[in-house]
Image (cartoon, rainbow, N blue to C red):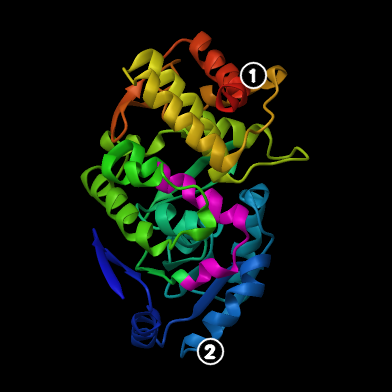
Amino acid sequence: MQKIPVQDYTIYVGEMFSALNKYLLDHAARALVVLVDENTAEYCLPILQEQIERKDFLVIKIPAGELHKNIHTCQQIWQVMMDKGLNRNAICLNLGGGVIGDMGGFCASTYKRGIDFIQLPTTLLSQVDASIGGKLGIDFNQVKNSVGVFQNPKGVYIYPPFLKTLPKSEIRSGFAEIIKHSLINDLEQWQQIKKIKDIETIDWTDYLVPSLHIKKRIVEEDPFEKGLRKALNFGHTIGHAVESQYLESGHPLLHGEAVAVGMVCEAYISNKVSGLSQHDLEEISQFLIHIYGRYPLQKIDYPSMIQLMRKDKKNVKDEINFTLLSSPGKCLINQTCSLAFIEESLDYYRSIHTMVAK
């Protein structure tokens, strides 16, 4: 087991159940609730039940998916907590991916003005990204994470075998955040990643801890996203808009799939605005299209996606805020560009399969 100290808590990676059991037994007098969704209830909760020594916990199950990351689901969670008489001394274990971690942490941080919570991330996305930083929240009016708080958990316990319960699409979604971390802060890791041809051959523990250390360095320097931490938003300004635009369509994207779209588009803008070379743009684009394919964006949706970008919480005044690349491993925060470049970037993404085919 590896330990990664972050601010006022610790991330445990590996065979972490002995550490989790110690924490829970040290707080044996406190009520314990475990939040799961339909998927983790089936695949991960049995593992947790077998491994933890405390058996006196309440399970709250919610529907799976970003579509349910809203205030209505929060009301259901709070209602169960209140009906069961949980007081401010309770502890909440969030067993799931990014949605469970974000929403479970948000519900815990606001219930009775805040109860303690622990993150047990079960997806690659949540293990490499959402497990650090204390950003919690829900979606509101189609805008991702627009209502939320900053609050650190009491601990993060990462059990890599949970990844074996995931479909390939979820693994691929999480890989996008590893790619992002390397592109903004680790040229050496990007040089390794871009050689990958098949994600099914990867031992994810080789990338998990290095990726966590990248985010740890950034978050510790800027815990409340006033400056450097905005680097982590590369690919997310456009990616969030794409994800929200198609969330209720017949073909929604997973978060990482949408971020992959965003990284291609924002690499294009980087080429126009912040000095990313044409060679690097094409290399990044071709790699992402090879791994993720090309989602069928519709030109008719551009105006509504741009409106979603205008509502992004990082914006200042009327300008859409981006994190852009100057070169792989280096980024620039608080960048802006014309609407024409944004539309060009979407056009570039839609046509990129032609370039890759050459």
Sequence-wise first label, 2 or 1: 2
Q: Is residue 275 left or right of residue 55?
A: left
Place of residue 51 in the rendered image (x, y in percent of width and height, measured from the top left): 48, 86
> For residue 303: magenta?
no
Place of residue 229 in the rendered image (x, y in percent of width and height, measured from the top left): 31, 39
Question: Is 132 in front, or is 165?
Answer: 165
Q: Which residues are magenta?
A: 161-179
Q: Looking at the picture, does residue 236 appear above or below residue 203?
A: above
- The residue shown at (43%, 63%) is 203
Question: Is 214 in front, or is 54?
Answer: 214
The quarter holding residue 299 reads: top right
Q: Secondary structure at mark 1?
A: helix
Residue tagged by mark 2? 55
Place of residue 137 in the rendered image (x, y in percent of width and height, measured from the top left): 50, 48
Q: Residue furthest right?
A: 250
Place of residue 24 in the rendered image (x, y in percent of width and height, measured from the top left): 39, 83
Looking at the rendering, in which quadrant would you find the C terminus? top right
Residue tagged by mark 1? 302
Q: Secondary structure at mark 2?
A: loop
